[in-house]
Image (cartoon, rainbow, N blue to C red):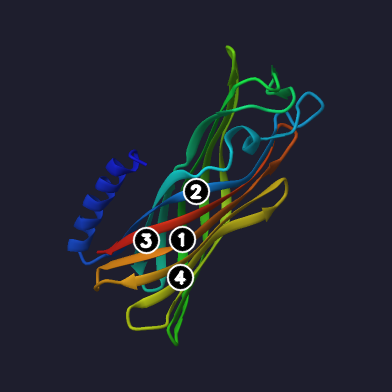
Amino acid sequence: MASLVPILTILSLGMAQAGAEELDFDIELEIGSTWQEKNKVQIPNDRDGDRFLLTDIAGSGPWASARINANWNIAGPHGVRLVLAPFSYEERGSLDSDVRFDGKTFEGGENLKASYRFNSWRLGYRYQYYDTNGWKLWVGATAKVRDAEIELRQNGVRASDDNIGVVPLLYLAGEYRFAERWLFQFDFDGLAGGPGRAIDLALKLGYEVNDRWQISAGYRGLEGGADTDDVYNFAWFNTALVSARYRF
């Protein structure tokens, strides 16, 4: 989470300059506690690999998490959005039986270190198509850069599998103002099909402190994975979050 501080500082400086030019920006820092509901892995995804649960080694958490959400309303209903969402953990545990992972064998019942990383960097376009009766709704598309790695270590034996790829996602978002300063908000990035799926859904209750500042609390769920010849990995994470948004 500390790694987000310099990024947030740079974005704030850039957007402050944009604000001086009367551009419409908002930036949100979201922090939370994340629990691992499931995380099933098999690498390689054939007879040379064994399927196992990272939850058996690492448990369910929680782990600290953070992200930055930024929006720039370019002109009228058109906007650009940026999401910086790093996440990782490192835990020790054991497995009930031997597991073959990425060409190495790890013994059951012995101490084992598991590292998991899933960083998500996104750039997207959104279009506001509805603004009536307290509701605002957006639709758009997102390009997500996935930076992922799973690593196991035991008694000098190490195996890891990393992956960087670009995934296209559908974007939906909305807010409903049910009182003068109170809002219900949701945002969704996701797509399913082919060898895998990706779902990122947040539900928030927001309070506008003033015209510039908003604080929120809510839930975010992340679920998805891939089933290919090389990799099988599906995970599900739940996050209890709070956030602060500043408008420029």
| Left or right for 181, reference 117 | left
Counting residues from the start of the chain, the first of labels 2 and 4 encountered is 2
Badge 1 marks a residue whose secondary structure is strand
- Judging depth in this view, the residue of 41 and 112 nearest the camera is 112
Q: At numbered mark 3, what does the secondary structure look like: helix, strand or loop? A: strand
Name the quadrant containing residue 58. Answer: top right
Residue 150 is situated, as x and y percent measured from the top left of the image, at 58, 31
**Where is residue 125 drawn, in percent x and y?**
46, 60
Q: Going from the N terminus, do you reach mark 1 or mark 2 first?
A: 2
Q: Which residue is mark 1?
A: 125
Amino acid carrying mark 3 in the image: Asn
Query: Which element carries disc 4, helix, strand or loop?
Result: strand
Is the C-beta separation of discs 4 and 1 under 8 Å? no
Q: CA distance from mark 4 to mark 3?
A: 15 Å
Label 4 sits on what residue type? Gln
Between marks 2 and 3 in the image, the one whose residue lies nearer the viewer: 2
Q: Classify 10 Å Cα crowding around label 4: few (below 14), some (14-19), many (20 and above).
A: many
As drawn, the label of residue 71 is 3
